[in-house]
Amino acid sequence: MSDIAEFFDLTGKTAVITGGGGVLGSAIACGFARAGAECAVTNITIEKADRISKQLAESCGHAKGYELDCSKEGAVETFCDEVYEEFGKVDILVNCIGGNLPEATTSDALSFFDLPLDAFRRVFDLNFTDGTVRPCQVFGRRMKDNENGGSIINISSMAALKPLTRVVGYSASKAAVNNFTQWLAVHLAQEYSSKLRVNAIAPGFFLTPQNQYLLTNDRTGELTPRGQQITDHTPMGSFGVSGDLVGAAIWLASDSARFVTGTVIPIDGGFSAFAGV
């Protein structure tokens, strides 16, 4: 192995990727496995988690899938216990659980004033309270005692940096993820361990099942006006693909980022840098 490869080597580390059965989460998990990390991945259904974990095991030798519904009381705690029983330790936590609901999205048929608050709360909890804060609490309680520290990576969104029209619940929840990431980075470093780092990745626009209905026509596959607007305002002129997140995730997870904490890294094809003119 070359010196530069060793710089980003994850051999000997155990990574937990919640939401690892999703498009973005599975790409990150695959990257970790190829870099040598043992991986625990979750999905809302065990079948998909198992399928992904078997693929990962071909690279890293030890991977396991778990069913996790983070909204259920005690589910994250039970999952954490199972991971520690199976792997013995956790060095990396990636919080990929998240999503949106049409009922928390304004449209011609649903104005902001008529948005059901229950749907807003479900989106907020999915992305923030249940999907990010709770795993950080449960796993962080143990990771803070790691002799060599560790890395927590939250998945934010471009909607946190530039609030997007229509997706009001999603934008608010991801903005909370950014603030929490910075708060937790400071808190853990000052109160517990300066070796336990917390950062976030803010993807730009990637086609996933949760946003495809907004960006493409489900009958023709062509871009919707919103999808066209996005690519027009992305200097690189396209949507991202899931593999585009892997390099940054491996960097943040590895010892090469040992002095990096409290950051939010945009991976957006230049969207956040473009003023539109």
Image (spheres, rainbow, N blue to C red):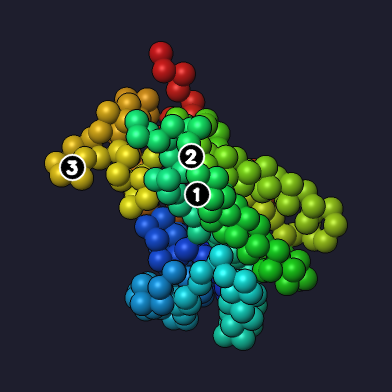
The number of numbered badges drawn on the structure is 3
Q: Determine the secondary structure under disc 1.
A: helix
Query: Residues under labels 2 and 1: Cα distance?
Result: 8 Å
**Of all residues shown, which one is farthest toward the right?**
191
- Front residue of 225/94: it is 225
Horizontal placement of 239 versus 95: left or right? left
Mark 3 residue type = Gly
Location of mark 2 (residue): 115
Label 1, residues with CA under 10 Å away: few <14, some 14-19, many ≥20: some
Q: Is residue 78 above or below residue 98?
A: below
Q: Position of residue 246 (x, y in %)?
A: 44, 54
Q: Residue at x 39, y 40 (%)?
A: 205
Image quadrant where one finds the C terminus: top left
Q: Residue at x 50, y 49 (%)?
A: 119
Cβ atoms under marks 3 and 2 closer than 8 Å? no
Horizontal placement of 28 versus 255: left or right? left
Mark 2 residue type = Leu
Q: Determine the secondary structure under disc 2.
A: loop
**Residue 97 appearing in the image:** yes
Q: Position of residue 36 (x, y in %)?
A: 49, 71
**Of all residues shown, which one is farthest toward the top?**
277
Q: Determine the secondary structure under disc 3.
A: loop
Earlier-in-chain disc, 3 versus 1: 1
Location of mark 1 (residue): 119
Earlier-in-chain disc, 3 versus 2: 2
Label 2, residues with CA under 10 Å away: few <14, some 14-19, many ≥20: some
Location of mark 3 (residue): 221
Residue 60 occupies quadrant: bottom left
Q: Residue at x 57, y 85 (%)?
A: 86
Q: Position of residue 242 (x, y in %)?
A: 37, 52
